[in-house]
Structures are given as C-alpha cells and as structure tokens.
Amino acid sequence: RDSLFMWLLHTETYTLHYFSSPEAAPPYAILSHCWDHNEITFADMRRPELIELKRGWRKIRGACEVAQQQHGLDWLWDDTCCIDKSNSVELSEAINSMFDLYRSAQLCLAYLGDVPGGEEAAAEGSFFRRSRWFRRGWTLQELIASDASIVFLSSDWVQIGTTEEEGLAKVVEEITGIDHQLLMTPLEEYRIVEVRARSIAERMSWAAGRETTRPEDR
C-alpha cells in the first residue's frame, strides 16, 4: 500500500520526512514503548522550539541516538510523532498497517521505561519481569511482528539484551508464554509463518492478561 510508509524521523536532524511508497522508504528502526504523559506528537514536531520542554522529548532523542550511534540507522518510526492523528484517514491506515510497519523495520527498539539499568533481567521478581511493556496490548504484536532482532533497553537507554540471545529469549517466554525459538529467529517471513502455524488457542493465550486503553484495541 502506497501509504504504508508515510513519515520517518531523521535520527540526527530530528526532522520528519514523507515517503510515498514502501520502495522509497530507507532502512529504519522502530520504537516500541508504553505511552506516558507528555509524549511528543506529530503536531509538536512542527514546533521545534517547544518539543524540548516536554518529557517525551527525552524518549525520542534517546531512541534516535541508539538507532544512529549504535546501529547506524538514519531513520526512526515512532507511533507518537510519526502519525498525523488529526488526519483520520492516515490514522486509520497507520493502525491497520502497524503489523507490517514492524515487520519491515531493520531493528525494533523496545524501551522499558520502568526497568533500571544494571539489574539481572532473569532474576526472580526483577523489574524486567514486571515491566508494564509485557502487559500492554499493542506491544504483543510488536514483539512477534518484527523480522529483525528486538533490542530491549532500560530506562537509561542501556541495552538489556536482544531476542537473539537464548537466555533472554527464554526469560521473555516465561513472561509471555511465547516460544523463545519463535522469538530468536529473525529470518524474513519465518516468524509470521510460525505464528500462523500455532493454534488459535495458543495465540489467544499470548494476549491473556494484556491491557489496552480502548476495548476496540484489544
């Protein structure tokens, strides 16, 4: 769909750019996170003199720095500021295309704002195991959709680990019930085939206990 990739954020200039088709879109990272108060919106990005005053700016800047400096990616997609929510057509298209947006990303950055850096993620009762990210509805599809590796980041942007690491993937399986082998294999097309091969009951179990703000999102 031509409108699948509409806006990407440049990770150095912090400017939004429109891309008219999937073929025109450059390699990009995608940010998965739980929304908090004062997130940066599409409209905010049109007023650069104000965005640094909002708490959400630290999240945008942190994600851009990790994507660019650690992974060499010049572009980022974030659902807070890369969708013009005043445009109902664009908003609907973005929601319907979310799975594809995550599948097409070169890298998925999972920011866990309630997990401090330096802890042992596998430890019983760890902040990682109790993170809100694992209970939100939207982050479920973000976890299983990405063909790329998912990089988990703590509140201070320290890398906790990735889904390519068997140890961490097994911890995520314990938290979510999703087979760690499915999470560890980032080959294109493989994961979606594996997901579809699982029973409806198993897939629905992954959603058990997850929360959404709106009933229709669930």
Image (cartoon, helix red, strand yellow):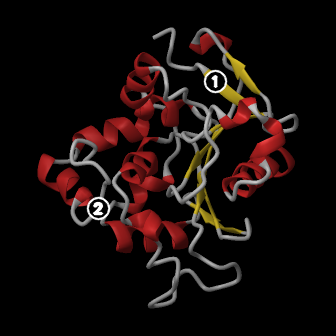
Amino acid carrying mark 1 in the image: Trp
Question: Label 2, on which residue?
Answer: 210
Q: Could you tell me which residue is drawn at 53 percent across and 59 percent down?
A: 36
Marks 2/1 in contact by CB < 8 Å: the verdict is no
Residue 11 visible in the shown view: no
Could you tell whether 129 is left or right of 24 in the image?
left
Task: Please tell me which of labels 2 and 1 falls first in the chain.
Answer: 1
Measuring from the top left, give residue 43's x and y in whole percent: 64, 32
10 Å neighbourhood of mark 2: few (<14), some, or many (≥20)? Answer: some
Q: Which residue is more in the foreground, 49 or 110?
A: 49
Measuring from the top left, give residue 166's x and y in whole percent: 53, 67
Amino acid carrying mark 2 in the image: Arg
Most extreme residue toward the bottom is 124
Residue 2 visible in the shown view: yes
Q: Residue 151, relative to residue 148: is it above or below?
A: below
Could you tell whether 100 is left or right of 56 in the image?
left
